[in-house]
Amino acid sequence: MKKSVISVLTTLTGVVIGAGAAGRVIGGEKDKIKAMSDKHLDLFLMMTQWVKVKQEGKNLSSFFEKNGYKRIAIYGMSYAGEALVEELKDTDIQVVYGIDRNADSIYADVDIVSMEDDLRAVDVIVVTAITFFDEIEEELSKKVACPVISLEDILYEV
């Protein structure tokens, strides 16, 4: 009898511990999904602002010209980074290079380097990964002397 009670208690304890661990895994997955959702919402809102800027007949090159930024680097070479390179083609603004954590697997019209590489001198670095801007700005500021600005800020200032 004692053996069966101990066996049942051990089984129940295992089930409770397992359920708690599963709940944490599911909760952890839920947190990841929420973070990804927030990131994509931020990107969507930024791109919507970009469309508004274009509808007003404005070009982002005016922001760079107004601030004396002729040679720039872009951090984050996914959709927004590629769009910025395209936007600045055939303007007086030169995109010298892009910076991305996946530098080895990105093909673009500009050189792509990683944060760990030596970063060539530019007038400004534009961060397109706006959700992580504060962390990226802090890291870049340790490596470069130029300003580090968010694409989102540019879009609301132009």
Image (spheres, rainbow, N blue to C red):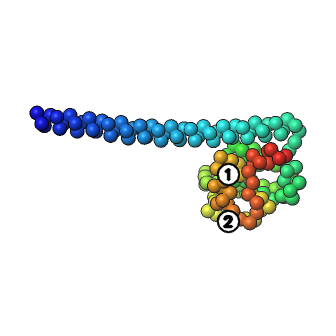
Q: Residue at x 47, y 41 (%)?
A: 28
- Asked if residue 89 is positioned above or below residue 137 in the image, the reply reads above
Amino acid type assigned to the residue bearing label 2 in the image: Lys
Q: Residue at x 80, y 61 (%)?
A: 123
* Other residues around mark 2 within 10 Å, as few (<14) / some (14–19) / many (≥20): few
Give the side of residue 66 with respect to residue 128, left or right: right
Element assignment for label 1: helix
In the rendered image, which quarter is residue 104 located in?
bottom right
Residue placed furthest toward the left: 1
Q: CA distance from mark 1 to mark 2?
A: 15 Å
Marked residue nearer the N-terminal end (1 or 2): 1
Foreground mark, 1 or 2, reads 1
In the rendered image, which quarter is residue 35 located in?
top right
If the image is split into quadrants, where does the N terminus sit? top left
* Other residues around mark 1 within 10 Å, as few (<14) / some (14–19) / many (≥20): some
CB atoms at circles 1 and 2 under 8 Å apart? no
Specify whether residue 73 is in view: no
Give the side of residue 106 with respect to residue 30, left or right: right
**Badge number at residue 133:** 1
In the rendered image, which quarter is residue 73 located in?
bottom right
Give the side of residue 70 with respect to residue 140, left or right: right
> What x and y, as percent, mark residue 58?
87, 42
Element assignment for label 2: loop
Given residues 108 and 3, the one toward you in this image is: 3
> What x and y, as percent, mark residue 30?
50, 37
Specify whether residue 68 is in view: yes
Amino acid type assigned to the residue bearing label 1 in the image: Phe
> What x and y, as percent, mark residue 78?
67, 46
**Badge number at residue 143:** 2
